[in-house]
Image: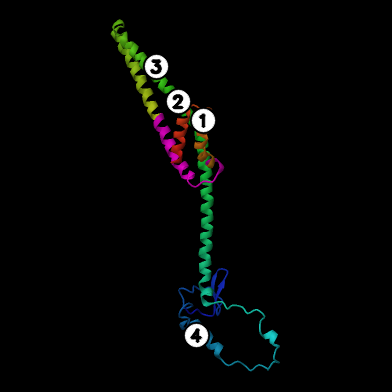
């Protein structure tokens, strides 16, 4: 591939050595058919004009004529194409670094969110326990009013029954809502956490991976019950899937 000898690489791009102006070598004659370029033709004609004779100079010593370490001539490919390649490599090196930084930030955010969730989700679990207990109390009250039906005036019986049933319906709806939201959050955070587990090298995540073996040791040493062991083991296995 022939490249115009006047093509130069400047700070802002390629420059024509004849005009000292910016030029796009890929849309002009610079690469491949520069001999047809009108600028090249004009300046090459000027260069071929006979120059005035110069006075003869004394021959220089051989050491001054020949360099001690011969330089490798830069090929036409390097002059024209290598800068383009360097620009692309530099661009994607920077992009990869940004992606690495973004993943590290994502990993930290996921681990921190999971840590906070493990503490704050206890409020939702406690709320479910309280709702279950309250629902159970109202169900007992409803069962008792049914047993006393024959000893209560019909109007009073119907009023109390409707009130209990209304409260039960409200409480059950609230319990279903809390359960659904809790499950959605647990599943949503679990997806992100399992994704981080597969690649993370943080001490906290590695510690979690070792927790299963530690659980077995605690069970053998009698520090936790079989029921607690099975519950914690199931939770850890779900996270590590």
Q: Which mark is residue 220?
A: 1
Depth order, front residue of 220/146: 220
Task: Tell which tag, 4 or 1, sits nearer the viewer.
Answer: 1
SS category of the residue bearing label 2? helix
**Residue at horizontal 54 percent and vertical 58 percent from the top:** 94
In the image, is 221 to the left or to the right of 189? right
Of pointers 2 and 3, the one earlier in the residue sequence = 2
- Which residue in the structure is indicated by mark 3? 137
Q: In the image, which residues are magenta?
A: 178-205
Compared with residue 191, is residue 163 higher up or lower down, i.e. above or below? above
User: Disc 3 vs disc 1: which is toward the camera?
Assistant: 1
Query: Where does residue 150 sit, x and y in percent of width and height?
Result: 28, 6
* Crowd band around label 4 with a 10 angstrom C-alpha radius: few (<14), some (14–19), many (20+): few
Image mark for residue 41: 4
Residue 121 in the image, given as x and y percentages of width and height: 48, 31
Locate residue 129: give its quadrant: top left
Q: Residue at x 53, y 59 (%)?
A: 93
Cα distance between the residues tagged 2 and 3: 15 Å
> Which residue is at the front of the view, 102 or 71?
71
Mark nearer the N terminus (3 vs 1)? 3
Q: Residues within 10 Å of mark 1 (few under 14, many from 20)?
A: few
Q: In the current view of this chain or complex, which residue is farthest to the top? A: 151
């Amino acid at each position: 591939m022939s490249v115009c000898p006047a093509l130069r690489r400047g700070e802002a791009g390629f420059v024509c050595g004849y005009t000292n102006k910016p030029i796009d070598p890929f849309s002009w004659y610079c690469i491949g058919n520069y001999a047809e370029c009108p600028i090249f033709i004009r300046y090459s004609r000027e260069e071929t004009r006979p120059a005035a004779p110069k006075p003869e100079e004394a021959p220089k010593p051989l050491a001054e004529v020949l360099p001690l370490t011969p330089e490798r001539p830069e090929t036409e490919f390097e002059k024209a194409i290598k800068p383009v390649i360097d620009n692309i490599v530099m661009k994607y090196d920077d992009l990869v670094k940004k992606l690495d930084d973004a993943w590290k930030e994502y990993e930290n955010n996921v681990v921190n969110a999971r840590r906070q969730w493990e503490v704050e989700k206890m409020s939702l679990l406690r709320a479910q326990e309280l709702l279950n207990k309250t629902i159970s109390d109202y169900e007992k009250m409803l069962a008792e009013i049914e047993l006393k039906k024959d000893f209560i005036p019909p109007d009073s019986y119907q009023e109390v029954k409707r009130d209990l049933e209304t409260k039960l319906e409200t409480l059950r709806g609230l319990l279903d809502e809390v359960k659904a939201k809790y499950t959605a959050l647990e599943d949503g955070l679990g997806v992100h956490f399992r994704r981080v587990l597969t690649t993370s090298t943080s001490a906290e995540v590695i510690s979690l991976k070792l927790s299963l073996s530690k659980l077995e040791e605690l069970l053998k040493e009698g520090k936790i019950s079989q029921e607690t062991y099975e519950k914690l083991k199931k939770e850890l296995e779900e996270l590590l899937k």
